[in-house]
Image (cartoon, rainbow, N blue to C red):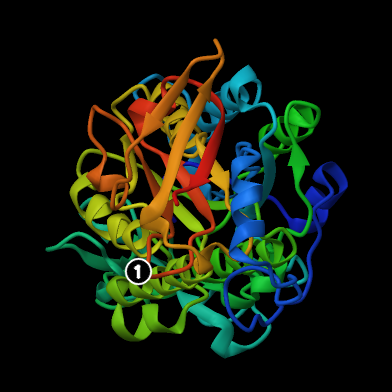
Amino acid sequence: MRASHVWMAVPCVALSTVLGAACGARTDLEAPGRSHSEPQQSPEEICAKLEAGLEPVQVDLFFLFDASGSMSEATVEGISKWQALTQAMWAFLFDPSAAGLKIGISFFPQHNYQVPAFCAGGFGCAGSQDCVPYGVCVPSGATMCSTDAQCPTQGEHCQLSGYCPLGGECDPSVGGCAQGECAGIGYCASHTKCDNESYRITGLSQLPDDAFGVANAIEAHTLDGFTPTLPAYDGVMQSAIDWQADNPDDLIITVLATDGFPTLCDPSLQESGIEAGIANLASVAQEGSDHGLRSYVLGVFNAQEEESARERLDTIAEAGGTGTAHVVRTDEDVAGEMVEALNDLRLENACSFALPPGIEQLDLNQLSVTAKLENGDTLDLVLRTNAAACDSTGGYYFDPPPPAIPHHIVLCESSCAAHPVSIVVTCKD
């Protein structure tokens, strides 16, 4: 029931009422990049646009929030993980520095309420094959499981849940009833929606005007169920890819926020265990990266889970082009740490500037980049290979870096701290 960092989920239909988001079908794209209908321009025309100055790019955030039942667990501060998340999001949404951001959110799991949530003895669902054995990984009791392979911590095993005819709990795999057989308790697989269309986002809200709508949707959401992370993540990622096709100059970011690992809606979990489930999530993040999207991962875990959580969530973040996940522990100031993580995300993408179509026709090493500051001063910037090559002297880099066709110029952190209002790029003779 846990997932990676902290964010939540609500039914797509409900969100569409509040935020203008809606469910829809997946769109197949030919390739990442700008519209194929862009007219061809000469190098002189491209240079003229650069010399006119580049404005900061529009940043669009696609959030996927884990709203499974485990998000109700308490933190060291006595509030639940969900309440800590809610506090962090209110602070983030109403921060004046977030003005101009566009926000879309989706929550997981979502449910088919025509099917019961739980079953017993193999009965009670849409069909006998739909009743999946249910248990927890012991000794921690932190993760839902049906098999030992689904337990993320080495040395743990899956203890299935059951009850005896005369009362009392038992493990149906070993028995343990004084009289009669142990009846296994399970969950109905078809109660949880496993199609990615149920988690899609097609409309975004803009800050600060829509901040109350977004915040209220998060605060009002009800926690329940397990973690169908794969279809939810894929649905949001496809939404972001589709949005990018219509808004090629925007900087588009996805954020997966969770407190655990996937538990259902991925056949490989049953067949090969949690590592296969993480690999599938990394493939989704990689698809986004191939389309020029950046994908962040945020997680909240207890101290015993931290090491395995970091290792697995880093795999997803690395595939998404953001290096490492941000993991918060429940014995820390969860709300404060989440606010810091969100602000870091915003600041990291605050100094991106959109490049005009046709930039690949120029010799990028022959460009001169100057930042215009609020006080009227200018700052000459040095080209860096990538973000990792930035140092205290600042500079800029292209995103994505060559040999890919770059869509943005991004300033290094120390140069961004100078608060440039625009940058001017000129073509050297």
Placement of 245 over or under 48, stated as above or below: below
Q: Nearer the viewer, residue 100 or 158?
A: 100
> Looking at this rendering, what residue extends furthest in the left direction?
155
Residue 329 is left or right of residue 162, and the answer is left
**Residue 219 spot, x, y in % from top left:** 67, 32
> Looking at this rendering, what residue extends furthest in the top direction?
375
**Quick one: label 1, few (<14), some, or many (20+) residues within 10 Å?**
many
Question: Measuring 47% from the left and 55% from the top, which residue is drawn there?
Answer: 294
Residue 35 is left or right of residue 89, and the answer is right
Question: Measuring 56% from the left and 70% from the top, which residue is drawn there?
Answer: 234
Residue 197 is left or right of residue 136, and the answer is right
Placement of 283 over or under 87, stated as above or below: below
| Residue wearing tag 1 | 278
Residue 132 is left or right of residue 387, and the answer is right
Question: Measuring 56% from the left and 15% from the top, which residue is drawn there?
Answer: 374
Q: Amino acid at mark 1?
A: Ile
**Residue 24 spot, x, y in % from top left:** 79, 70
Q: Is residue 4 visible?
A: no
Question: Residue 123 occupies which quadrant of the picture?
Answer: bottom right
Q: Nearer the viewer, residue 210 or 361?
A: 361
Q: Is residue 372 visible?
A: yes
> Looking at this rendering, what residue extends furthest in the right direction?
17
Question: Residue 368 occupies which quadrant of the picture?
Answer: top left
Question: Measuring 56% from the left and 14% from the top, which residue is drawn there?
Answer: 376
Q: Nearer the viewer, residue 254 or 69?
A: 254
Q: Nearer the viewer, residue 317 or 370?
A: 370
> Looking at this rendering, what residue extends furthest in the front direction?
429
Judging from the image, what secondary structure is the residue with disc 1 in? helix
**Residue 224 spot, x, y in % from top left:** 59, 51
